[in-house]
Image (cartoon, rainbow, N blue to C red):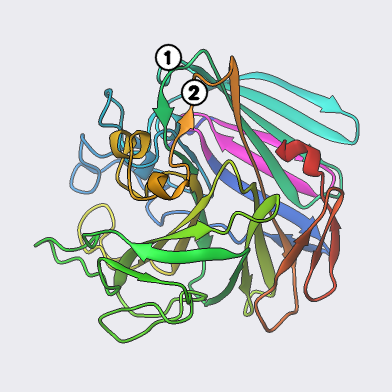
């Protein structure tokens, strides 16, 4: 199976885009003689087409789901026709430019479809010796509210320890994602809320959302609501067995929620077939959970508390969503916290790495 890919590279880091569906095919940080790649990729991504597994109406983002993808809208578009997670995660992108910049490289791609009337461009920046992919998604000419999210996915089959910038609470939606008659299994309580991420209600008793996996054979979803203080929100996922750490950074006022998708073999039906194991989605978002575009764009329980759940595409001629994601080798044995500055990030184990905060706006 031939897939259209484009690779961007700077000293110590490379990133590859799947142009057919706009997904991060791979992101590899080269440091200390190692290739660090903690991101997940579905086990069926490179299998040949099989109608028994890949139904014609299957959302396109599922075919080779990997690394990270940008959702506009997040999950459901119930305003205009689009696949799950929007055309940004299931439509074709074209390369506009890939050029050398001072100290690195920058590539710009454009989605071949409009989103809410907007032209969407994806800008990737890699800087020499920075262990981060800096991403910008730029909407030009759009109108209306749009829930958005990045959909980063970690391979935590051997276990991971998580840390987050301050959160106000965690909550689950009214209905479990695997509550139907198709054999799927969810274990968190739905609905439920907790201010303690280490003791979230579940059918197994309180579980610790900062350690993953916390149960066998389940598929669950929870929303973490950011505390408003601070410029940057962040998340880390330490993989002790692999001796590395993944890092996500966002402007917290633009993306005020973090969605956790906990996919550990809890979907026995195609295309999952119980094979999607130990994957944790850490999805930095501006959305009313997984409720979709209409609910996120109107008044809801979060907006009544002054928390944004959609981006106003008509607020300016150009609207940008910016994030950074990366990884490092690490010998730590406890979850790592981050102190994010304008020009560097210091991890709680003392590791300091270069970081360009201006690229997050």
Which residue matches tag 2? 313
Q: Are marks 1 and 2 in contact (CB under 8 Å)?
A: yes
Q: Residue at x 27, y 24 (%)?
A: 81
Residue found at the far right of this picture: 102
> For residue 20: magenta?
yes
- Residue 135 in sight from this viewpoint: yes
Measuring from the top left, give residue 99's x and y in whole percent: 79, 23
Pick the front one: 120 or 338: 338
> For residue 16: magenta?
yes
Pick the front one: 313 or 21: 313
Measuring from the top left, give residue 171's x and y in whole percent: 37, 64
Which residue matches tag 1? 117
Dividing the picture into quarters, in which one does residue 96 lie? top right
Q: Earlier in the sequence, mark 1 or mark 2?
A: 1
Vertically, is 214 above or below 291? below
- Circle 1 — which element? loop
Residue found at the far left of this picture: 181
Q: Residue at x 46, y 63 (%)?
A: 280
Measuring from the top left, give residue 257's x and y in whole percent: 49, 52
Q: CA distance from mark 1 to mark 2?
A: 9 Å
Q: Residue at x 48, y 43 (%)?
A: 149
Q: Where the C terminus falls, by quadrant?
A: top right
Q: Residue at x 28, y 67 (%)?
A: 266
Relative horizontal placement of residue 258, taking residue 90 as reference (left or right): right
Q: Main secondary structure of the magenta part?
A: strand
Measuring from the top left, give residue 106's x and y in whole percent: 75, 29
Start and end of the magenta stretch? 5-23
Label 1 packing within 10 angstroms: few (<14), some (14-19), many (20+): some
- Residue 276 in sight from this viewpoint: no
Relative horizontal placement of residue 336, taking residue 109 as reference (left or right): right
Relative horizontal placement of residue 75, taking residue 324 as reference (left or right): left
């Amino acid at each position: 199976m031939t897939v259209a890919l484009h690779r961007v590279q700077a000293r110590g880091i490379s990133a590859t885009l799947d142009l057919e569906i706009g997904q991060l095919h791979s992101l590899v940080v080269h440091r200390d003689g190692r290739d660090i790649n903690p991101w997940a990729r579905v086990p069926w991504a490179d299998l040949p087409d099989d109608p028994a597994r890949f139904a014609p109406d299957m959302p396109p983002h599922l075919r080779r789901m990997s690394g990270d993808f940008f959702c506009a809208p997040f999950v459901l578009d119930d305003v205009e026709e689009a696949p799950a997670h929007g055309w940004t995660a299931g439509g074709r992108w074209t390369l506009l430019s890939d050029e050398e910049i001072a100290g690195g490289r920058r590539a710009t791609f454009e989605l071949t479809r409009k989103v809410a009337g907007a032209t969407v461009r994806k800008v990737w920046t890699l800087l020499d010796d920075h262990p981060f992919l800096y991403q910008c998604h730029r909407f030009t000419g759009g109108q209306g509210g749009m829930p958005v999210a990045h959909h980063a996915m970690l391979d935590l089959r051997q276990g991971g320890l998580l840390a987050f910038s301050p959160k106000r609470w965690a909550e689950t939606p009214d209905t479990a994602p695997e509550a139907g008659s198709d054999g799927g299994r969810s274990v968190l309580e739905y609905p439920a809320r907790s201010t303690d991420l280490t003791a979230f209600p579940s059918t197994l008793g309180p579980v610790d959302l900062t350690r993953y996996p916390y149960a066998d054979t389940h598929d669950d979803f929870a929303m973490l609501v950011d505390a408003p203080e601070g410029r940057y929100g962040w998340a880390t996922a330490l993989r002790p067995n692999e001796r590395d750490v993944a890092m996500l950074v966002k402007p917290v006022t633009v993306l005020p929620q973090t969605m956790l998708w906990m996919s550990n073999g809890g979907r026995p039906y195609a295309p999952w077939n119980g094979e999607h194991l130990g994957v944790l989605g850490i999805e930095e978002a501006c959305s009313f959970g997984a409720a979709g575009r209409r609910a996120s764009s109107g008044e809801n329980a979060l907006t009544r508390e002054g928390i944004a759940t959609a981006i106003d595409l008509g607020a300016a001629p150009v609207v940008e969503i910016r994030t950074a994601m990366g990884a490092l080798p690490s010998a730590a044995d406890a979850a790592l916290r981050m102190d994010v500055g304008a020009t560097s990030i210091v991890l709680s184990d003392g590791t300091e790495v270069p970081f360009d905060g201006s690229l997050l706006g």
